Amino acid sequence: MTSNRTEYSTRIRDAVAHREPGRSLPAPFYTDREHFDLDLAAVYGRSWVFAAPEAEIPEPGDYLTVDLGPWSVIVVRGGDGEPRAFHNVCRHRGSRILTEERGSTGNIVCGYHKWTYGTDGALRHAPAQPAGFDRSCFGLRPVRLRAVAGLLFLCLADRTPEDFDEVAARIEPYLRPHRLAEARVAVRSDLVEHGNWKLVMENNRECYHCDGHPELLRAYFPTFGYTEETVPPPLRPVYERSCRADTELRQRLDKLGVPHALIEEADGRATGFRVQRSALDLAGESMTPDGTAACRRTLGDLPDTRLGDLSLHLQPNTWFHACADHAVTFSVRPLAPDRTLLRTTWLVHPDAEEGTDYDPGTLTKVWTATNEQDAALVARAQRGVADPAYLPGPYAPNEHQVEAFCAWYLDRLREELQR
Amino acid sequence: MTSNRTEYSTRIRDAVAHREPGRSLPAPFYTDREHFDLDLAAVYGRSWVFAAPEAEIPEPGDYLTVDLGPWSVIVVRGGDGEPRAFHNVCRHRGSRILTEERGSTGNIVCGYHKWTYGTDGALRHAPAQPAGFDRSCFGLRPVRLRAVAGLLFLCLADRTPEDFDEVAARIEPYLRPHRLAEARVAVRSDLVEHGNWKLVMENNRECYHCDGHPELLRAYFPTFGYTEETVPPPLRPVYERSCRADTELRQRLDKLGVPHALIEEADGRATGFRVQRSALDLAGESMTPDGTAACRRTLGDLPDTRLGDLSLHLQPNTWFHACADHAVTFSVRPLAPDRTLLRTTWLVHPDAEEGTDYDPGTLTKVWTATNEQDAALVARAQRGVADPAYLPGPYAPNEHQVEAFCAWYLDRLREELQR
Amino acid sequence: MTSNRTEYSTRIRDAVAHREPGRSLPAPFYTDREHFDLDLAAVYGRSWVFAAPEAEIPEPGDYLTVDLGPWSVIVVRGGDGEPRAFHNVCRHRGSRILTEERGSTGNIVCGYHKWTYGTDGALRHAPAQPAGFDRSCFGLRPVRLRAVAGLLFLCLADRTPEDFDEVAARIEPYLRPHRLAEARVAVRSDLVEHGNWKLVMENNRECYHCDGHPELLRAYFPTFGYTEETVPPPLRPVYERSCRADTELRQRLDKLGVPHALIEEADGRATGFRVQRSALDLAGESMTPDGTAACRRTLGDLPDTRLGDLSLHLQPNTWFHACADHAVTFSVRPLAPDRTLLRTTWLVHPDAEEGTDYDPGTLTKVWTATNEQDAALVARAQRGVADPAYLPGPYAPNEHQVEAFCAWYLDRLREELQR
């Protein structure tokens, strides 16, 4: 993406070559500016990155600006109804073009010297240019964009990862019943976490720390994360209840033709992902304090309100949860080696009305609390790994997804260093 | 100036060698710490830099501290009435000596250990030093200072640019009628812009963006910046009105013996500059909302209140405007690769009284608004050029002064890299 | 301490090799990130560093977290009454374990995944680890800790300076009468100074600047810092009064068997130090505005309330003052090249009651004022040495302790660069 190739130091090459599997990453991966720049180039600059739900730009001319590290990307729905993406940089002297986070516009006009681009990226008008000025040389630089069942992914590289079509084809049936492309944004929230983006992702890949998430554990079963082998004896009755709920859920989903099997391919491919559908505790409808639906209108077109929780994880930067009544998207965006933006977006049925059909407080309660708890954990993790006394330590078996994430991540760095 | 010579990297030498003329500068010139350090050494450390109007230090003992990047310079009027400049660094253990922005003092006393210097820089007293201590070895380090028609310029280098005498001789007749050396400071303002200092200067060198300056365009003619060839047909009547005003102004100035011809030598010499006098619209007296004088007392000694606008530009860091009733000085001071201080100072007749002769709000209205508008543009330009997708783009013909500034700037870097 | 050895540049080796004795240090020692990192490794990572008075952790389970640059250290009193220190970094994935500045706890529990350590550092419980997981490999990493007459020192290096036992044995008799191990913390204060940690230490090593400390000079004699040779004639009567008070104090101390002789070995050894006992002016009891005791209960077990001021200095980061009625400890902690934390702690008799036996405002008045005055001086010194025009200047004879500190400091760097 960047025009200048960066020369990485021997130090960084050694760090990538010699990381010990099964242990947390060495400190510089989390603290060092050069590592951060490599992450941006190798991971955010190469992968399909989750940008936003399509619901953010329902109408032609609707746009978003998506900031990823030093990049800013305009995601805009064209007059023809197609979503497209462009670098948010004027082809004249490089000014940022759109400075609002979202809006609606007929043309994309740079506020500096009024260079005017269509929603297809073509330069329509550049004032005061001489005869012979060729506008066709100065269209907005395009960014690859893909919609998958209502979720928009962008790729900053010219050569996109080859396996995304296959991944999209496999996750689409899981998402399809929720009709996210037609959903409406109910609530958004931004949280700046004081830790490296990988600590945010790693933290999300294990429930070893879930004691710190009382709201989340109440929505799931309190035995979430335990297996037949690891569940402590006092929790066995709860564990068995959760197994019965799970069996019952899968039978119901099979009848409805809704896929639910776990696929876990976080490692060993460019587009690491994981998808599963799990039963919820209490009323069993939604990730809410009492498990009842947060929204009266169900999201998709299925008659049942008890579909459990569809949990989708996609590397490098996102996870999703979808219940019958609402969905939540998460987008992880690096700001600095030790700062990361987490954007959370709650989606509901397009006709659901705030106050009547849903209460925003109830809708967002579990994940707002969980995000804040995670942010505190990530901050203390960042401070610890920045201490010279830090030594990478061993992952527990229930942290195998963290190890898979790290293995995937290091493969991305190796590929970049070989370019 | 600095004692340690800096070794610049191959990367920076390549960037200077290979910049494409006619296009905006590559990103690292605006974003990179090493480029910023080179700018300080090659440009601010070598050129005659505008420090302040003499009006800031009217009496013996009056002083200013002028911060330029990491440097701080004391500009003080000596007991003999002469303005002088010294590094604001104690010769004992290096403490900053004067910490206020301006004041008045008999001696220059360091607040740490009371080393006491005269306003001529000589060390007068150093307490508790042993017999044999030679005070003459520890005077303040002098900085070159020149007054030109009431404007003070300083040069941090030992070898000053050779062409400054000539430039001073050519601009002095333009400034002389305004008698700035006798003026009084009416208002000062400081604005921190979130962009590189060159983006601040470049932005000032073109009116391609002047649609964003309604107050400024009202003071000038709305066709400001257009030529016979480029003026849009609907604006032609206004354009012709402005030409008539200009012709009429020049006839009047010729009668008064006030020079007005355009000189444009921003490029091809060490002290790049440009000077011109233009007609103003509306009442035609001053850069105010309605064109009438902001101050009842005229600045200089001329009978006419309609002298148009004297616009003087001097590289690296300043521009000036002078009307019959007041003058405004601008000083651009780098703070960081992406932060710049703009100091604006309004000057009026020494006997003009606030409230009676002028209203500070009216006096400052046009340039306060214009500065704020420019700061917003510079901030968005900085964010854009810091995006990895930025590519240098083509200057329009009406941006030829920006190209001249860039060419001049690159010559300064080349000279520095050859030292 | 750090696992990765750092390669220091030729630039930094040259700077250490070529510093001119008798002059203040060149600018990069105070401003440069690489120099700062070397300071942390060579000085704070190798020396015995003052952590806190024992009075901070009177009971078993009481703990402190001590942050030194990037390190955080837990200082905890074990169940057996012994104080110990550990790196505040979890052996699992490196999270910061304790996030409060002080507290009391039975076990040391990491808030992330509940790894639980005893106050002896042993890992007692790591949830969800597989059979075969060897807890004994994952105890907290210990940090060396020494108590000297109620003052706790820590050393981050595995090989501690060999001369500390001897230094401890020599200063212990000076401190013993004050029984600091039994004292109580009356007041703490933290001050962030805007200067390099060495400027904070250097400033403390001379009274050339004491004109700026009216409160301190009133507690001491106004001639503090002058010698027979340097005292100005008008101050000679005061000087003679101070000499008489000093003689009288020493006679009294000899009768009590309290050591008072000056030892000054700041230079030429790993644990540079200086100790002396001086007479106080006015009532002569304490460092208070009128010289009377700030606390009705005397600290130690001596019948006399007029013991003068015990002044102890220990490199790299501390100084102490103890009078009959109270003691003050100072701990200097680097935060950044240009920012330093100064923690000041006032100690009184364990049974002294606030309001009845002492007024906190009176107790802290002299050093609160002095610290703030010093912080202002350090800030202006930092700004001055960061100016490219700064040249190292000559120390006056009354700054010989500053020179000793610099010589000691450079020896530490040389040792580190030879490792």
Image (cartoon, coloured by chain):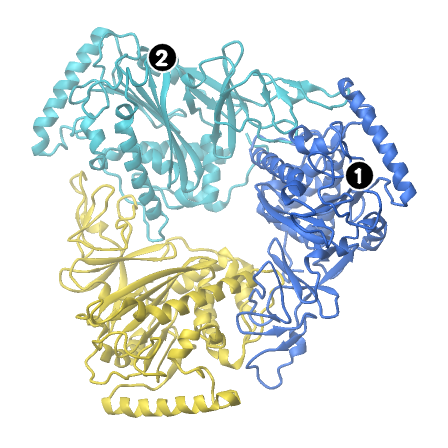
Chain colours: A cyan, B blue, C yellow
The reply to whether residue C341 is visible in this rendering is yes
Determine which quarter of the picture holds residue B319.
top right
Judge whether C120 appears above or below B337 on screen.
Answer: below
Residues at marks 2 and 1 on the same chain: no
Place of residue B104 in the rendered image (x, y in percent of width and height, measured from the top left): 63, 65
Q: Which residue is mark 2?
A: A350
- Front label number (2 vs 1): 1
Determine which quarter of the picture holds residue B1.
bottom right
State the CA–CA distance, disc 2 to disc 1: 61 Å
Q: Which residue is mark 1?
A: B308
The reply to whether residue A23 is visible in this rendering is no
Q: What is the three-letter code of the residue carrying label 1? A: Gly
Left or right? Give the position of A248 relative to B98.
left
Place of residue B279 in the rendered image (x, y in percent of width and height, measured from the top left): 80, 35
Place of residue C116 in the rendered image (x, y in percent of width and height, measured from the top left): 18, 48
Q: Residue placed at 18% from the left, 70% from the top? A: C350
The numbered disc on residue B133 is none
**Observer-nearest of C110 and B273:** B273
Which of the chains bears the disc numbered 2? Answer: A
Q: Secondary structure at mark 1?
A: loop
**Observer-nearest of C371 and A178:** C371
Which of the chains bears the disc numbered 1? Answer: B
Judge whether A14 appears above or below C208 on screen.
Answer: above
**Observer-nearest of B162 and B390:** B162
Judge whether C278 appears above or below B253 on screen.
Answer: below
